[in-house]
Amino acid sequence: MKDSLNSSAQQPMIVKYVETLHTGIQSQTLSRYAIGYVLRGTMYIYDGDKRRKLTRGDVFYLGIGHHYIEHFPENGQPFEQILVYYTPTDLQRILLHLNITYGLTISNSHSCDNCNSRMHVTMPAWNAIRNFFLNTNNYLRDDDFRHDETAENIKMTELIYLIASHEDCCIKSKLLSNVDAAKENFEQIVYDHIFKDISIDELARLTNRSLTSFKKEFRRHFQMPPHKWYIRQRLMHSRLLLISTSKSISEIGNECTFPNTSHFIKLFKKEYSVTPATYRNRHMSAMEAQPAATAEEVREAL
């Protein structure tokens, strides 16, 4: 899944995704924010060696950048989800409309480690959100709706209202934090350069900040220094490539911006306590040792 920051006239705001087969862990790059809902099946969102499990009826938020996600169909039925994409401009416009037209007062005092440290949050959908997505699923069966920008905007406004007027929670906190367009631009530049050989000084220049200001803002957004965060993101991607491709260790290191293979192995071992080769072999052994197990059960064993 590769999203774009093009206008909603060129890129749909509301999309239904259907997967009939399990395709393993996938890297998905978003350049718009998204609120999603699982209609059927099981979904995992990975964060390093940890993962979040979502099932039918769960709602989730995905921030701009790279996500590692796995989908499982269930009982012979395809995995299904709906994603609603938005930009800060969309959000500002809708919130202003809700405030002026309906007097909606928006506040949020929720804050937790989950909101502050993750690019994604998940939770069971409350009744109004569940009904919204089930109703939207019916609309998406109509070809006219899928090409009607006005209809999309009306549904988008409804979703923003349901979240903004709900009691404070992680989803609401993440949504309201996206109003700042400057924050979006900063994050987009950071994510665009994960796999590029670029210095922190150059990144600071690209964001029109001094080195000191860049480092301070970076820590505010990502809760760690730039160099450490970039290494972690690259290692997370290398982990995915190790278990989903047959590429050599050196090829994976190069692809993840670690041209020195020995250095790559050292960093990987420091992060995951095993070498890349051992990590891959453990995964392969688990798959071979449990031929009758489902892919989901094998993932749990790793």
Image: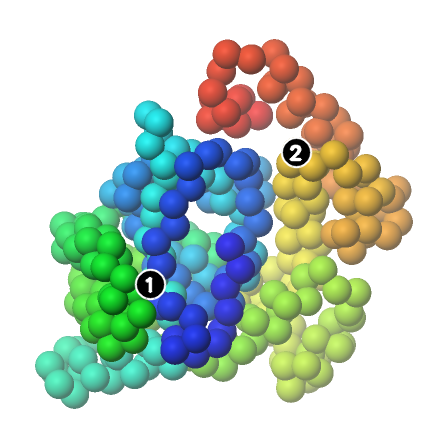
Q: Does residue 270 show up?
A: no
Q: Amino acid at mark 2?
A: Ile
Indicate the secondary structure of the residue bearing disc 2: helix
Please state the horizontal and vertical placement of residue 40, each as a whole percent of the image.
30, 39
Number of other residues with Cα within 10 Å of mark 1, as a class: few under 14, some 14 to 19, many 20 or more: many
Q: Amino acid at mark 1?
A: Ile
Instruction: Give the label, 2 or 1, closer to the camera.
Output: 1
Please state the horizontal and vertical placement of residue 116, each as a whole percent of the image.
44, 59
Q: Nearest the camera: 163 or 81?
A: 81
Quarter of the figure with the C terminus: top right
| Residue identified by numbered label 1 | 14
Label 2 and label 1: CA atoms lie apart by 32 Å
| Residue identified by numbered label 2 | 243
Please state the horizontal and vertical placement of residue 91, each as a whole percent of the image.
33, 76
Please state the horizontal and vertical placement of residue 238, each as a whole percent of the image.
70, 44
Q: Nearest the camera: 27 or 237?
A: 27
Instruction: Give the left or right position of residue 210, taking residue 259 as reference.
Output: left
Please identify the quarter of the rendering in which residue 289 is found. top right
Q: Report the residue at 55% width, 45% height from top.
A: 26
Position above or below: 271 against 98: above
Indicate the secondary structure of the residue bearing disc 1: strand
Position above or below: 36 against 275: below
Mark seen at residue 298: none
- Ranked by sequence position, the earlier of labels 2 and 1 is 1
Instruction: Give the left or right position of residue 133, taking residue 224 as reference.
Output: left
Q: Report the residue at 24% width, 54% height from top.
A: 141
Counting every numbered tag in the picture gives 2
